Amino acid sequence: MGKAVPLPGVQPALLKWARETAHLSLEEVAARLKKAVEEIDAWETGADAPSYAQLERLAYDLYKRPLAIFFLPSPPAEPKPEAEFRALPDADLRRLSRDTVLLIRRARAYQASLVELFAGRSPVAEPLWRRLNLDTSRPIAPQAAAIRSALGVPAPGADEWGAADGDQALKLWRKAIEAAGVFVFKDTFKQKELSGFCLEHPELPVVMINNSTTKTRQVFSLLHELAHVLMRRRAISTFDDSLLERLPPTEQRIERFCNRIAAEVLVPSQDFAAQATVLSASIEALPSEAFAALAARYRVSREVILRRFRDAGRVSQAFYEERKSEWDGQRSENASSGGNFYLTKGAYLSERLMSEVFARYARRQISVDEAADFIGVKPRQVDELESRFLQGLAA
């Protein structure tokens, strides 16, 4: 096999920019390509250049960028996660994994699709964020009650919530939030400590939650990100409370506020107090089954119930952390997608996005290639995904 011929016209600065924005080191790229670090460095300094095949591998496999971008005169303007997400400490933002960076980029692509599909305007006549504006200086309970009322979700314990496993609850909350104008996506986060993130937009905000956990935890993450949307801010959030201690005071206050809003929306304090009156005065002496019964009423995790007792001063921080650690160890990862591409993609994509794309595709207003671009699949997968989506609506 002959020696690879360097490809003329590739901009070294673009190669370095693409690597750094994918959060990969020179050593990682060299290892993936089975090349010496010095060779990758030579490409980025202009001393050498990759061949066409090598550039394809860099673009499509490692950096997830279109090939043409490497021939631009300079890197395109693109916000960095460190600059736009303030809900994690700076050091943790700089250490975001390549997979997380690519998820953020995918969410931006979905948002760009929405902007194009809806001409930059919300498809909802009166989006939730125009009716409600959260304020950390105001009491939690009435703000959370306003959210729950505006979303029109059933009362706690109502039959409409369905099974106690959280799946029906997640579907109901997600549908209500999308009907209010927020586009909800899911994906598998390889950084397990991250719960989700949101991309603020004056008309088309996007939320993406981590599917790598239980449905009840996803519900809490969804409401937490909704709180960020209603505060008109972008954020990336975590399950790890210890990370909050390293945030600047203002950001720490906002994150704790969003946690409290989510908990209050899911478990209204007045209803919770009524349920708790029949319990033992010593909450810490209760068996796990008691927490599980309350969790089933509100379709949340036991941790959310425990957090409510902690915030009310009925259990200590030490007890909260001990039980949380115990339950975390018992929790198995969510595997509801079953490994089927179409089931997984259908669960991950915003229902409103799919509905709009498939409606336009059915009316021949967009081509199969355009439909594929909007929802991030290959053209040959569009028809099957459309069929399954329509079957799901009819079920």
Image: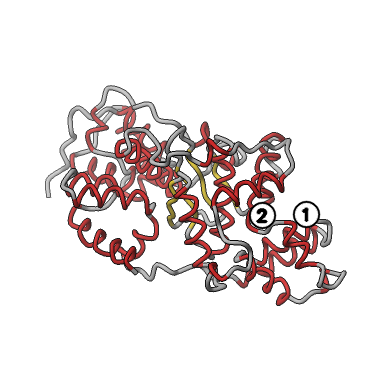
- Badge 1 marks a residue whose secondary structure is helix
Q: Position of residue 162 (x, y in %)?
A: 53, 71
- Badge 2 marks a residue whose secondary structure is helix
**Image check: 133 left or right of 167?**
right
* Front residue of 16 and 143: 143
Q: Which quadrant would the C terminus be assigned to in this image?
A: bottom left
The answer to whether 295 is drawn above or below residue 176 in the figure is below
Residue, x 51% and y 33% (percent of image)?
A: 84
Rate crowding at label 2 as few (under 14), some (14 to 19) or many (20 or more) other CA atoms within 10 Å.
many
Q: In which quadrant of the rendered view does residue 133 lie? A: top right
* Front residue of 372 and 295: 295
Residue, x 18% and y 46% (percent of image)?
A: 369
* Front residue of 254 and 162: 162
CA distance for labels 1 and 2: 10 Å
Circles 1 and 2: CB atoms closer than 8 Å? yes
Residue, x 68% and y 44% (percent of image)?
A: 257
The answer to whether 174 is drawn above or below residue 27 in the figure is below
Q: Which residue is mark 1?
A: 311
The disc, 1 or 2, on the residue closer to the chain's N-terminal end is: 2
Q: Position of residue 285 (x, y in %)?
A: 83, 73
The answer to whether 354 is drawn above or below residue 94 in the figure is below
Q: Amino acid at mark 1?
A: Asp
Q: Amino acid at mark 2?
A: Ala
Circle count: 2
Q: Does residue 189 appear anywhere in the picture?
A: no
Q: Position of residue 151 (x, y in %)?
A: 54, 51
On residue 263, the disc is 2
Q: Residue furthest left?
A: 2
